[in-house]
Image: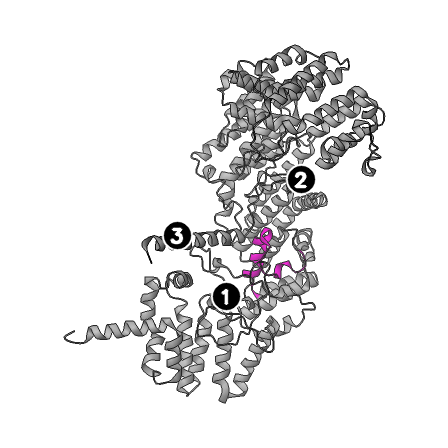
Amino acid sequence: MSPWKKALLYFLCLLILTCSAVMIILACGPEPDPYDYGVSFFHNNISGGKAYRAFYFTSSQSLYDVDEPVNEQDVNAWEWASYLKGRVKASDVKKVMYQLNHPADSVLLQGYLNLNRGLPDSLKRNTFLPALRKNKAALLYYRFVKIIEPAVSYKDPWRSEPADTAYLLKNATYALKEASSVKDQFLKTRYYYQAQRLFHYTGQNKRAIDIYEKQIANARTSYYIKGLTLGLRAGEEWRTGDPAKSAYQFSKLFTGFPERRIQAYQNYVANKVPESEVIAFARSNDEKAVVYAMNGFYTPRFSTKYLKKVYQTAPRSPFVEILLAREVNKLEAGYLTPKLTDHLPYDNLDGDYYGWNDSLKKAKNMGKYISELGSFCTMIAKEKKCRNPQLGMITKAYLEWMTGKNAAGFTAINEVDDAGLAIKMHDQKQLVKLLLITQKIKRLDSAAEQELAPSLSWLDQKVKQESITNGERIKAFQDYGGERRLQRFTWSARDVYQKLLAPMYLSRHDTTKAALSMLKGMPKLHEDTLACYHQNYWNDYTTINFWQNYLHSSNFRQLISYKKYKKKGENTPYAKILTSGLKRTSFDCLYNLLGTAYLREHNYQQAVSVLSQIKKYSPKDFPLEYYNGPRLKSNPFVVQLNDYPKNYHQGKRGGYSKYRFAKTMYNLQMAVKRNPQKAARYTFAMATGLYNTSRYGNAWFMIAYAYSDSWIEKNRREPLYYDQDLNKTIDAEKLFLKARQLSNDPEFKGQCTFMAAKCKQNRYKGADDEFVHHKYFQGHADPYQDEIRRNPYFTELRKSYSRTRFYQVAVHECSYFRDFLASAHTSKKKQQPGK
């Protein structure tokens, strides 16, 4: 093969491998949630609703919301409905004007609106069309706008054909002529707007400016047209060389016309004008405050600069509260989240796996900044100049909690008077108070639980209220027209239970209550979810993973006891709250988990007893081979000399369920005692079953709920309690050796020795990466190769069982054993004299 062909082949192989890796990565889970990727107890909507929601803080995207706070179509439809009077509905105007598809719109324009056809059945009850047809001047204007629409709007974002300048100029002249002759002021200003925008689109900026200044700026113009024409005028200032004035006009558009707010902000930012030049145009402190606020919204790093400027300039501006919330949310992202999640005693699904908050986490002098922000909060609370001075002390208390200064936090929160407090402020106060109580607790005993109960009960009610509405609808940049739901109380409750209470229970070794806390933190969990195999349960991963991997049989017995009947002394308000999550889980789910725990503990008799109580079986009892693929089933008692490819063949009697596996293992245990003559074979079968429940076997799903690389991660917080079977195959090795000891058959003893060697090499340095090395590089990592050469069982196999038939089979089937023999032969040759 020629060199260039070899190079091409290498490149294609590399490309395929890269693409495959990308596909695997993309298949591993969903995109991170741009609204829930860290811990947040300070709700960003504390000072308002949707009006300035796009400018709440997020590290994940340039704006928090892609939708304007007011729908432009609604504004225009309402104006038209008001203009035509009568019983014209704005919704009917919107449907005809914006929501008809192109064919229907075209038929309507050429037919009914051309006075030569009736209305189609779907529009016969529309109130807008008859009223429009009766108003000849309005009908002519509407037809004009619809006719030129294709030339001025690009529905295809990839379309790049140049505009038909001659056509647009012709229609601009027509619009100007109609504007001068029509008497109706509503239509007159709309014609002038059409003329301005058509000259604007064709680059005739001076003519567009002339129309705006002479015919629109000081005219009695409708609200909607004022916003449209001001936006065009701001753009024309930039085009004609005055970006500072352009930025100033966009700042006016920003506050005065919410249906164009995001557009105005983006154009303001794009101007990149020094702040002082824009401020020079401002006519009032309120206008200056808008400029400062817009610059603050464009500041992703920690900074009180624009917050202080807005407050000093216009203390009653709504931007004071919004900018303050932004700074607190930045601290949550850069300071609080790593503080609470970096050292959790369990695996936590990190929502920020793209590293959106990395720059904030690396900021220096964070303590000094928190102190600076706290001083500002104290000032606005005392001066009482802003709209909500109480927010100052609520925020101050939260910052004190964040930095562990609980006494100061209680002092601050106690200064907040509930009288006249807005609902969102009151809720934030209650949430901060809950955090302070939680942090005050040194030991989570019954007295502490009693103190927590009222606050947790309040939080429970907020979560329930939020679940009724499914939160607040919002669109993210990456959703391409889809939507998400903001569930602030649900997220905060999750973090209270999972990041605060669960670690406290674990610190006192109360894993059962830690599990209840984890479950309470995920109110969407229900029925059998906890016992399902992992695919497609990413949103609830932290709770599911904890329940599936951290609980022993003793914990599950307690949990089942909580669900069956209230334990003595556990009927307190706090206990009712904490155990309420169990209502959403089924007994079948709990028996599945308990039975699995017994399998891990080799208590097969109890496993049989518990698993037999499951009433309903489903395909979900087995994992998917791959996403949307078939369910994995196997025979755990099949002997495999090679682990890969895994033998998922079920055999004549079908695949083993957990119940059938437990029953078989228990019967083998009993058979060993009843029939000593066959004890070696029974023990070997048990060892094989146990080995196959490891990650190297074909029945790993008997003791695990997901086949995951996280099992062997080097930075894992702590190994799974059943790691000696799942990853290390220690107990299987012991059983293979016991089977060997019980037999006198050299063939059988050789097989036992070989299987013990397999078990042992799973604990060698480099074993975790061996599959990848061997599959893609056709070799072994050096440390692993060295360990193989010293495998004591391979030495025994060569010395004691080399004359058996099994020995030849092992040599033929096992590359590791061949490598061992080759290295032993090389070492022997080196030791011979004269060589």
The disc label shown at residue 256, or none: none
Q: Is residue 172 left or right of residue 126?
A: left
| Residue 527 is one of the magenta-drawn residues | yes
Residue 132 in the image, given as x and y percentages of width and height: 80, 25
Specify start and end residues of the magenta stretch as a single range: 526-552
Q: Is residue 148 above or below residue 703?
A: above
**Quarter of the image containing the C terminus?**
bottom left
Which residue occupies 54% across, 67% down? 703
Amino acid type, mark 3:
Phe
Residue 29 in the image, given as x and y percentages of width and height: 55, 52
Tell which of 634 and 412 is nearer to you. 634
Residue 507 in the image, given as x and y percentages of width and height: 52, 54
Kindly state the secondary structure of the residue where label 3 is placed: helix
Say which residue label 2 marks. Answer: 473
**How far separated are the C-alphas under marks 3 and 2?**
46 Å
Earlier sequence position, callout 2 versus callout 1: 2
Tell which of 792 and 342 is nearer to you. 792
- Between circles 2 and 1, the one closer to the viewer is 2
The answer to whether marks 2 and 1 mark residues whose Cβ atoms lie closer than 8 Å is no
Which residue occupies 48% across, 51% down? 22
- Can residue 315 be seen here? no
Tell which of 401 and 236 is nearer to you. 236
- Can residue 661 be seen here? yes
Res 616 → quadrant = bottom right
**How far separated are the C-alphas under marks 1 and 3?**
43 Å
Res 514 → quadrant = bottom right
Say which residue label 3 marks. Answer: 11
The disc label shown at residue 722, or none: 1
Amino acid type, mark 1:
Tyr
Amino acid type, mark 2:
Arg
